[in-house]
Image (cartoon, rainbow, N blue to C red):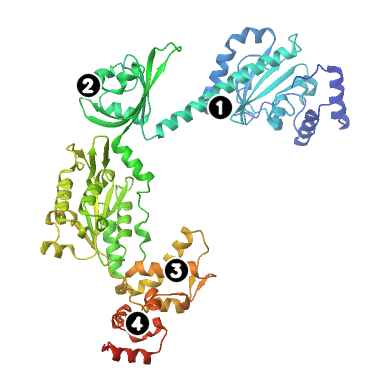
Amino acid sequence: MIREHRSRKKLKKYYEKFMEKDIIDPNVHPWVASSWQMSRELGVRADVLDLSHCLSKKELSDRQAIHGEAIACLAHLSEELQEFFQKYDISLLLVDRDAVVLKCYSSPFYQRIPGEIEGVRVGIEEIGTSSISLVMEHRAPFWIFGPEMWVEECHEGNACSAPVMVNGDMRYIVTFVFVSQVDIPQDAAIAMLLTLRNALEEHLANIFRSRAEKAILNAAPFAVYHILADGKVAYANRLGKKRLEDIGTTAGSATNLWNVILNYPHTPLHLGFGGQPSYNEEVTWITKNKTYEDITTVVPLEENGNGEVNSIVVVSMPIEDLRTLVAHASGYMAKYSLSSMVGEAPGFRSVRDKAARVAKSENHVLIQGEPGTGKQRLAHGIHQESSRAGGPLISLRCGDATPELLAQEIFGSALRREASHPGRLELASGGSLFLDEIEKMPGNLADELAEALSTRKTHRMGEKVERDIDVRILASCDGDLKQLVERGVFSRNLYQIVSRNVLRMPTLRSRRADIPGLAKHILSELAQQHQMPAKVLQPEAVEKLMSYDWPENVKQLQGVLERAFFNTPGRVLRASDLDILGDVRQHVLWKRDRTAFMQVWKAAGGNVSRLANLLDVSRVTLYRYLKKFGIEKKS
């Protein structure tokens, strides 16, 4: 960078030698030599500076607005140097990465006023070899002597440029142009230029870092505040500002926060200004407008290390938001969409279309149908299509726990003060709660749930504190829930709430034409989920699937295809690869046991041809066993 002083006469001879004979003298700096050759190839004018390649006034104004922070910073840094620049005839330029002069901070620039050079392109294509073009190419500071420049008009002066790098990227170039040979020491001029460059880099890096920090804080799912000793909020992120607006104040407001928080002496804020930090404490904030329950951390900030706390940083998250965040982090989100519900049979298409309409309302939904028909997938699709899609989807199978444990799962429990746990109702607030096998919920518990849904309030088992809930119930039932109500087996109150919309999933055997498309979709999903090559069914395999009545519906079809997918080499599934009866055929003595035979007989829909294919026996053999067990075949 700091090159030894060179004889201008010799440099002039090297330049003329190249211009007249196209010969590069060995003493020419290699960067300069390469740039001269490029300038000649580009046909750049060499007698005078060509300043005709410039932006319009509007284009320049727009570009200066974009780079306003850098322009203003360099103006501030160079303000005290103006007298120095004038004394030594130095021009200071700020050039962007497109080689456009954004600003000229001092004059003259080869006898041009600043307005003449601003907006001009000064890359190698426009003015040939210069310190700017060399820095553009090599990303390193460079001092160039006058006779090394391409344009003869500039040979009486010198120039020095340095790249402005931010996070490894060249954003600008700062340039000193010495119009004439000056007495200022070369190393002193370079040191001054680098000082300006380094200060500009630091300023831009701080701006970049500040913007990133602000973006991070605004994206964070919690409120952040910087509170001064007088109760003034010096800073609040996006969620913090919203919270302040809700309670009637704003960040930077002169309002004393201690007068806004009515229970201030009993909060961690008070302790924080006493030098005591708090971490992840459950805090109740009482204001005139609303009472909040948060998980809060308070960090005291000391000044000068003298133990005196002048401000505190507060990080706070509403407990409701925390539950939603935990629900999302735990995977409590819809895994399926309505579009993943494959089938074009009229009955199925009608249910899917109704589900899309029902999803847009806020009413609870009851989904009925035989086991394995896809009730859970439909519930996921309804949640995903609803306005609650951004909230959690919590699932609970009502038949998997005792009444006592089921109550704790739904409402939560507070067996002692330090061990209070939210239930599924609280976790699902703002989203949906999928209650699978709702018909297995005990009557008294169902009535309690109906009360909570009606009042939109709940309390944990073992405590009396009421908490607001905002939950949509998506319930499923393997049978007819209305009949269970009429028989007095299920709560009428809960039924009336969840049956505002009723969807009935058709059996797979009632939409047999959908089986080929379903099978193809299931195989495609398996390939995507496990990042394996796709597999296809041979026509004979499809026919085999079509011949079965699928008593366990889509769930059974899924299981058969999964076994074939993982156990069959290659990418083609044949009929022999599909073990539809599975354990029933292999381990049950259907030839000797009437019950076992009836199981496979019903699975084949009472059709001799289908069962013969499934069991891989002749029709004559089957007729013999039908006679043996006293079974009449279908006509």
Q: Quadrant of residue 552?
A: bottom left
Q: From mark 1 to mark 4, how far is it between C-alphas?
A: 89 Å
Q: Considering the image in quadrants, where does the N terminus appear?
A: top right
Provide the residue designation for mark 1: 60
Q: From mark 3 to mark 1, how far is it between C-alphas?
A: 67 Å
Q: Give the secondary structure at mark 3.
A: helix
Provide the residue designation for mark 4: 590
Disc on res. 50 = none
Among the two numbered marks 4 and 3 on one chain, the one whose residue lies closer to the N terminus: 3
Q: Answer whether residue 39 is visible to the viewer in this image.
A: yes
Q: Are marks 3 and 2 in contact (CB under 8 Å)?
A: no
Q: From mark 4 to mark 3, how far is it between C-alphas?
A: 23 Å
Q: From mark 2 to mark 4, how far is it between C-alphas?
A: 77 Å
Q: Are marks 3 and 1 in contact (CB under 8 Å)?
A: no
The residue shown at (33%, 79%) is 600
* Mark 3 or 2, closer to the camera: 3
Residue type highlighted by circle 4: Trp
* Mark 3 or 1, closer to the camera: 3
